[in-house]
C-alpha cells in the first residue's frame, strides 16, 4: 500500500508539473525570447516566403514559443513602416518553390511595389518555382519586386494553373456509404466530391472561369512589372519548364547567381556594417504605439465562422476560427471607443454557421448606425458565410484573386449503416417524437419526408441569405438570385457584378475608411483584438484558474514582451453538428496548397 501511495503521489506530482509548470515555463520563455531589439543603423530586411503563411496572425500561445507567426498582415504592415524607416536600406525576398494563395501573393506584391518606389533596392531570390497550382501568382509576386534572381540550375515552371477535384461517389457506392446532401443552388459544390464521380457542368464552368480570372490577373500584373505585353509573357512562361538560364534569355528574370552574391550586393548598397534582419523580428516595432488620438479600428477575422465565444476551445488547436460573440464584441468595442472614426474589418473566411454569420452582419450594421463606417478588406477568402458577414459593410475592397460570393447553402450527412453492416457492425435506433428526429442519425439515409422537410428549411436559409445580400448591396433580389446560386467569384469578377466596390488590398481599404470617416485628422490604426481568450480553455485543460493565467500574462508583460496579449490568444475549429446548414465554400477551391 505504501508503494502504491508513493507511486500515485509521483504520478500526481508529474501531472501537476506538466499541466501547470510547462505552460508557465513556455510563457516565460516566450516573453524572454521575444523582447524587442532596436533595428541596426543600417538594416537589410529579409522576407522568407518559403514557410506556410496565414492571412492574419495566429494566436496559439504555444506556437513557436510565442514567436509571431509570419502572416500577410504582419508582412505588409512591416513593409509599410520600412518604407519610411531610415534604418532600413534594402529588402531580400526569398521566393517559395510552390504556389501561393493568389490573393496573398497579390497583397504582398502590392507592398513590394510601394516599397520599390522609395528607391531602396529589392532582390527577389528564387531556388526554383515548380508546378503547384498557383505558381503564376508566385511569379507575379516575384516580378513585383523588381530584380528577380535565380540560382544556377534552378527551374521556372509557372506554365499555368490546374484545379484537381477528388470524387468519392464510386467508392461510396462500392462500400455502401450514402451521401445525403441538399445544395442551394447548382454552383454550391462544396460536397460534390461526395455526390458525383466527375465535375457537374455548373462545377466545371465555375472552376474554369475562376482559374481563367486568376491566371489572367497574374499575367497582366507580371507583364506590367516586367514591361512586356501579357501575350508575350504568357508565351514565354508557357514554353516551359525553363532553366534559370533560359528564363534569363526570355527576360523573365534578371540574373542567374547564388544567394551569397545577392546578399553581398544588398549589403554593399546598404553601407558599411549593414546587418540582415528577418521581417519577423523587425515586425515587433511596427504597430502604431501612439497612446491616443483619432483612429481607424482594425478588426481581424480569420477561419470558419462559429457561434459562441470559444471559451471551451483547445488552445493547442492549429485551426483558426471566427467566434461570433467575440467578433461582435470587438466591433462593439470599436463603436464605443470615442477615438475610433471608422472600422476596417479584415475577413479571411470560407464561411460556416448561418446564424453566427447573421450575428456578425448585424454587428456591422449596428456600427454603421452608430456613425462608424465599416470597410471590409477581403483576404484570400470571403465566401459564403464570409460574404454574409461582409455584405452590409459601407464598402467592400477585395484583391482581384480573392475568392468571394458563394452565396448559397448546403447541409446533410453521410450515412454509414450499410457500410458498417458489411463488417459486422449493426446500428439500431430507438426514438420518440416525429420522424424528423432521426433525420441525421448515422445509420440510414434521409426518407422522402425527411428530405422534403430538410429541403424546405434549406430554401428558407437560402432566401434569407439572398435577402440580406440584396439589402446590404442595394440590389434587387432578382439580381442577387441570378448571380448567387452558390457560385464562387474572384474579386475582379465580383467587382463587375456589384458584389464588391473596389479591387485593392488592405491599405486601399484603410484609405476608403479614412475617406468615409470624413475626418481630416491623421488617423492612426488601432488594432482591436478578436482572438479568443484561452482562460477558460486553460482552466478546463490544466485546472489553472483564470486569475493564475492573468498573473502569468502580467509576468510576461513585465519581462518586456510588447505582444504579451498574444500569449493569451487561441484559435480552434470544431465540427458543426449533424443537420446544421453550412454557408461555407471549399477552403482550397482551386486546388492549390
Image: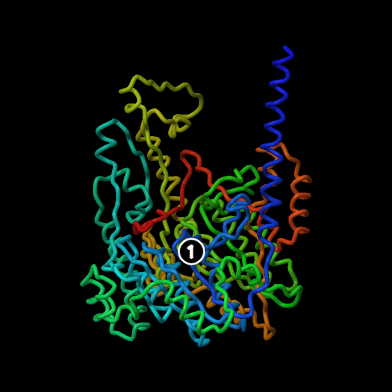
Q: Nearer the viewer, residue 463 or 270?
A: 270
Residue 292, percent across and down? 76, 74
Q: Visible in this render: residue 325?
A: no
Residue 89, percent across and down? 55, 82
Q: Visible in this render: residue 211?
A: yes
Residue 108, percent across and down? 47, 72
* Picture residue at 37% right of the left edge, 21% below the top: 425
378 lies left or right of 88: left
* Picture residue at 38% right of the left edge, 40% below the top: 452
344 lies left or right of 2: left
Quadrant showing the C terminus? bottom left
Residue 376: image quadrant is bottom right
* Picture residue at 62% right of the left edge, 61% below the top: 363
Residue 29, placed above or below residue 151: above
Residue 276: image quadrant is bottom right
Q: Residues within 10 Å of mark 1 (few under 14, many from 20)?
A: many
Q: Residue furthest top?
A: 1
Q: Nearer the viewer, residue 164 or 363?
A: 164
Q: How many marks?
A: 1
Q: Nearer the viewer, residue 85 or 409?
A: 85
Q: Nearer the viewer, residue 371 or 503?
A: 503
Residue 66: image quadrant is bottom right
Residue 185, placed above or below residue 194: below
Q: Secondary structure at mark 1?
A: helix
Q: Which residue is mark 1?
A: 469
540 lies left or right of 118: right
Colour convention: rainbow
Residue 484, placed above or below residue 371: above
Amino acid at each position: 500500500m505504501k508503494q502504491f501511495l508513493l507511486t500515485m503521489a509521483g504520478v500526481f506530482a508529474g501531472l501537476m508539473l506538466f499541466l501547470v509548470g510547462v505552460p508557465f515555463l513556455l510563457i516565460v520563455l516566450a516573453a524572454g525570447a521575444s523582447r524587442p531589439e532596436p533595428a541596426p543603423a543600417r538594416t537589410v530586411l529579409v522576407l522568407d516566403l518559403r514557410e506556410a503563411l496565414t492571412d492574419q496572425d495566429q494566436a496559439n500561445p504555444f506556437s513557436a514559443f510565442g514567436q509571431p507567426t509570419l502572416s500577410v498582415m504582419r508582412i505588409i504592415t512591416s513593409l509599410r513602416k520600412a518604407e519610411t524607416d531610415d534604418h532600413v536600406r534594402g529588402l531580400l525576398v526569398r521566393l517559395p518553390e510552390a504556389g501561393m494563395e493568389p490573393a496573398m501573393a497579390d497583397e504582398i506584391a502590392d507592398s513590394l511595389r510601394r516599397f520599390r518606389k522609395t528607391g531602396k533596392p529589392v532582390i527577389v531570390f528564387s531556388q526554383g518555382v515548380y508546378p503547384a497550382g498557383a505558381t503564376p501568382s508566385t511569379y507575379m509576386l516575384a516580378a513585383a519586386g523588381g530584380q528577380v534572381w535565380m540560382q544556377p540550375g534552378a527551374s521556372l515552371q509557372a506554365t499555368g494553373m490546374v484545379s484537381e477535384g477528388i470524387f468519392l461517389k464510386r467508392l461510396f457506392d462500392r462500400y455502401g456509404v450514402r451521401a445525403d446532401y441538399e445544395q442551394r443552388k447548382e454552383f454550391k459544390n462544396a460536397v460534390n466530391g461526395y455526390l458525383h464521380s466527375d465535375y457537374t457542368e455548373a462545377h466545371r464552368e465555375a472552376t474554369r472561369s475562376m482559374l481563367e480570372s486568376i491566371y489572367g490577373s497574374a499575367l497582366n500584373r507580371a507583364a506590367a512589372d516586367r514591361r512586356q505585353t501579357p501575350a508575350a509573357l504568357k508565351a514565354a512562361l508557357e514554353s516551359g519548364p525553363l532553366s534559370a538560364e533560359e528564363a534569363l534569355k526570355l527576360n523573365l528574370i534578371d540574373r542567374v547567381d547564388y544567394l551569397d552574391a545577392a546578399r553581398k550586393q544588398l549589403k554593399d548598397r546598404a553601407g558599411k556594417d549593414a546587418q540582415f534582419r528577418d521581417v519577423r523580428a523587425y515586425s515587433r516595432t511596427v504597430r502604431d504605439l501612439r497612446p491616443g488620438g483619432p483612429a481607424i479600428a482594425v478588426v481581424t477575422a480569420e477561419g470558419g465562422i462559429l457561434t459562441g465565444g470559444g471559451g471551451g476551445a483547445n488552445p493547442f488547436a492549429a485551426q483558426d476560427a471566427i467566434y461570433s460573440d467575440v467578433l461582435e464584441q470587438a466591433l462593439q468595442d470599436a463603436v464605443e471607443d470615442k477615438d475610433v472614426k471608422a472600422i476596417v474589418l479584415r475577413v479571411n473566411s470560407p464561411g460556416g454557421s448561418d446564424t453566427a454569420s447573421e450575428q456578425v452582419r448585424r454587428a456591422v450594421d449596428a456600427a454603421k448606425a452608430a456613425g462608424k463606417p465599416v470597410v471590409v478588406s477581403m483576404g484570400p477568402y470571403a465566401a459564403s458565410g464570409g460574404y454574409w458577414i461582409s455584405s452590409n459593410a459601407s464598402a467592400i475592397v477585395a484583391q482581384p484573386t480573392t475568392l468571394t460570393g458563394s452565396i448559397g447553402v448546403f447541409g446533410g450527412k453521410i450515412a454509414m449503416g450499410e457500410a458498417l453492416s458489411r463488417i459486422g457492425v449493426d446500428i439500431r435506433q430507438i426514438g420518440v417524437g416525429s420522424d424528423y428526429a432521426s433525420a441525421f442519425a448515422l445509420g440510414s439515409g434521409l426518407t422522402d419526408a425527411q428530405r422534403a422537410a430538410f429541403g424546405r428549411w434549406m430554401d428558407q436559409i437560402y432566401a434569407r441569405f439572398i435577402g440580406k445580400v440584396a439589402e446590404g448591396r442595394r440590389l434587387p433580389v432578382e439580381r442577387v438570385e441570378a448571380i448567387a446560386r452558390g457560385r464562387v467569384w474572384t474579386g475582379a469578377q465580383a467587382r463587375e457584378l456589384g458584389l464588391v466596390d473596389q479591387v485593392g488590398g488592405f491599405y486601399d481599404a484603410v484609405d476608403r475608411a479614412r475617406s468615409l470617416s470624413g475626418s481630416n485628422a491623421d488617423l492612426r490604426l488601432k488594432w482591436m483584438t478578436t482572438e479568443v481568450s484561452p482562460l477558460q480553455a486553460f482552466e478546463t485543460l490544466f485546472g489553472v484558474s483564470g486569475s493564475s493565467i492573468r498573473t502569468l500574462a502580467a509576468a510576461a508583460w513585465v519581462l518586456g514582451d510588447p505582444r504579451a496579449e498574444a500569449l493569451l490568444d487561441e484559435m480552434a475549429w470544431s465540427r458543426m453538428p449533424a443537420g446544421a446548414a453550412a454557408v461555407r465554400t471549399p477552403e482550397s477551391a482551386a486546388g492549390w496548397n
